[in-house]
Image (cartoon, rainbow, N blue to C red):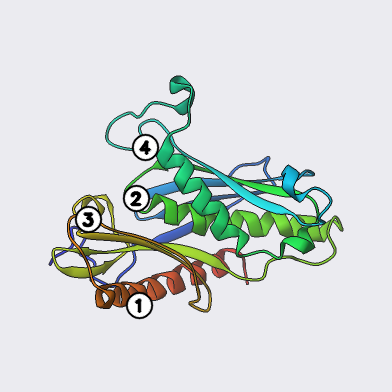
């Protein structure tokens, strides 16, 4: 197959991370992966969900939305429908689970970090971009807590990133844009740490079944893609 943007099957789109994109949050990042752009803001609150009160443990959670005209047609804001979009709920739960894998929650203490991920332009891979950018916003927020003495030990234990892979026109490909994602036989999102250990896999045979061998090939591609993202995370964070 020939990809629309000329990339090879195992090539990521361009990755750019702009820290401190918004002034007020404890951590803020604009992540751009190809034409997909997501603003990720991290907010620290001195409270935890009821099930964690008295435990000494902190919490990481996320909210996700796609702004009107992030896509080719205008989608309605959730507030106009008086209920949250089911897809957004599923994605923000994924983001929260993924980012909790990056943190020793006991070192955070009884406080929460909320990662708001707002897609301002969508061209495939928005949930993966939200996780990858959300990690950098989270890292900055926790760094400020540590530097100010609010918490004693920096609680980050893993870099976490995510990438989409899939089967398009019979080829196993890395980092699907929208044109590929919308026609893919299989679409898989893989969340990993910097050592290639898997935090979560979400995969669907969109138009056909796929095999364990296919999945193994896709995971190998995801490892390459996530390695490239982690490299850019560390570059942005000056690590």
The residue mark sitting in front, 3 or 2, is 3
Please tell me which of labels 4 and 1 falls first in the chain: 4
Residue 231, percent across and down?
Answer: 50, 72
Please tell me which of labels 3 and 1 falls first in the chain: 3
Residue topped by disc 1 = 220
Residue 55, percent across and down?
Answer: 81, 55
Q: Which mark is residue 70?
A: 4
The residue mark sitting in front, 2 or 1, is 1
Residue topped by disc 3 = 180
The residue mark sitting in front, 4 or 1, is 1
Q: Secondary structure at mark 1?
A: helix
Identify the residue shown where x is 22% and y is 67%.
Answer: 210
Please tell me which of labels 4 and 2 falls first in the chain: 2
Identify the residue shown where x is 60% and y is 64%.
Answer: 101
Distance of label 3 from label 2 (alpha carbons): 14 Å
Q: Residue furthest front?
A: 51
Distance of label 4 from label 2 (alpha carbons): 11 Å
Distance of label 2 from label 1 (alpha carbons): 24 Å
Q: Which mark is residue 35?
A: 2
Query: Counting other residues with Cα less than 10 Å from the Cα at mark 4, is it few (<14), some (14-19), or many (20 or more)?
Result: some
């Amino acid at each position: 197959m020939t990809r629309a943007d000329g990339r090879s099957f195992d090539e990521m789109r361009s990755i750019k991370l702009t820290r401190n994109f918004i002034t007020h949050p404890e951590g803020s990042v604009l992540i751009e992966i190809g034409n997909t752009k997501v603003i990720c803001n991290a907010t620290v609150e001195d409270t935890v969900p009821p099930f964690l009160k008295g435990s000494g443990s902190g919490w990481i959670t996320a909210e996700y939305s796609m702004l009107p005209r992030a896509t080719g047609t205008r989608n309605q804001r959730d507030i106009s429908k008086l209920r949250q979009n089911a897809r957004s709920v599923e994605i923000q739960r994924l983001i929260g689970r993924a980012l909790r894998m990056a943190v020793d929650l006991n070192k955070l203490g009884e406080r929460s970090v909320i990662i708001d991920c707002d897609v301002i332009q969508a061209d495939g891979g928005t949930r993966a971009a939200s996780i990858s950018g959300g990690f950098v916003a989270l890292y900055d927020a926790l760094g400020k807590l540590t530097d100010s003495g609010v918490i004693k030990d920096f609680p980050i234990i893993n870099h976490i990133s995510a990438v989409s892979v899939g089967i398009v026109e019979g080829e196993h490909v890395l980092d699907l844009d929208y044109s590929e994602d919308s026609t893919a036989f299989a679409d898989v999102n893989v969340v990993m740490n910097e050592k290639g250990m898997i935090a979560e896999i979400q995969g669907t045979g969109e138009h056909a079944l796929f095999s364990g061998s296919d999945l193994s090939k896709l995971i190998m591609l995801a490892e390459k893609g996530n390695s490239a993202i982690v490299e850019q995370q560390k570059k942005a964070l000056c690590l």
